[in-house]
Amino acid sequence: MVERSLIIVKPDALQRNLLGEIIHRFERKGLKIVGLKMVAIDDIKIVEHYSHHADKPFFADLKRFMQSSPVVMFVLEGFEAIDAIRLIVGPTKGRAADAGSIRGDFAMSVQYNIIHASDSAESAKAEIARFFSNNELFAYNKIDVDYIYGADER
Ligand code: IDP
Ligand code: MG
């Protein structure tokens, strides 16, 4: 099934100039970007987005971190994309993530772990609706592959 997932490139990644590196990894895998923007996440949305951690002792710190600079958000699309993306991202704790994953290659921390990716179809649906309106999401028309190789010049 074709799925969509919400990606947030967190403030630590932008601070470290890792945006291009991160987008590159998803593009070369074959995932399509169907929406993309830079956003300062407001109080209401950050509490909603991390509501599963709202009563944790680290929540205030997490909120401060996520609002410490703008973030870049994009929506990726692909076949069974949600799980495929979580494999590329790696588990929450950077220092436990496999080398080769984004967190495994770029993070040591649990909190400062570079990137968010939706963890299920339900959360992807809610997260995309939270941060993107319908007119910010796009479909690609298939391009005849011959054109990519210059066949349009014949
Ligand atoms: P995920 O990002 O891998 O899906 P979640 O459990 O959904 O992990 O947690 C959301 C985010 O909250 C994490 O990516 C991380 O930034 C932060 N976080 C999770 N657990 C901790 C913790 O124990 N201490 C500090 N920050 C945490
Ligand atoms: Mg999560």
Image (cartoon, rainbow, N blue to C red):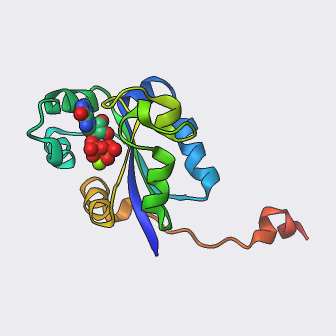
Question: Does residue 40 appear anywhere in the picture?
Answer: no
Name the quadrant containing residue 59.
Answer: top left
Q: On the rendered structure, is 6 left or right of 59?
A: right
Query: Where is residue 126 drawn, in percent x and y?
Result: 25, 61
Residue farthest along the left direction in this orientation: 55
Q: Nearer the viewer, residue 103 or 115?
A: 103
Q: How many labels does the image show?
A: 0
Residue at image x 42%, y 34%? 96
Query: Residue 55 sits in which quadrant?
Result: top left
Q: In this rendering, does residue 22 appear at all?
A: yes
Residue at the image point whose x is 28% and y is 26% from the top? 68
Give the percent coordinates (x, y) of residue 99: 55, 36
**Quadrant including the C terminus:** bottom right
- The picture places residue 76, in percent across and down from the top left corner, at 47, 57
Q: Which of 8 and 111 is in front in this view?
A: 111
Relative to 130, say whether 152 is above or below: below
> Is residue 19 shown left or right of residue 108?
right
Residue positioned 73% across, 73% down in the render = 144
Using the image, determine if residue 16 lies above or below residue 8: above
Query: Residue 38: image x %, image y %?
Result: 38, 40
Image quarter for ligand 1 equals top left
Measuring 36% from the left and 35% from the top, which residue is drawn there?
A: 93
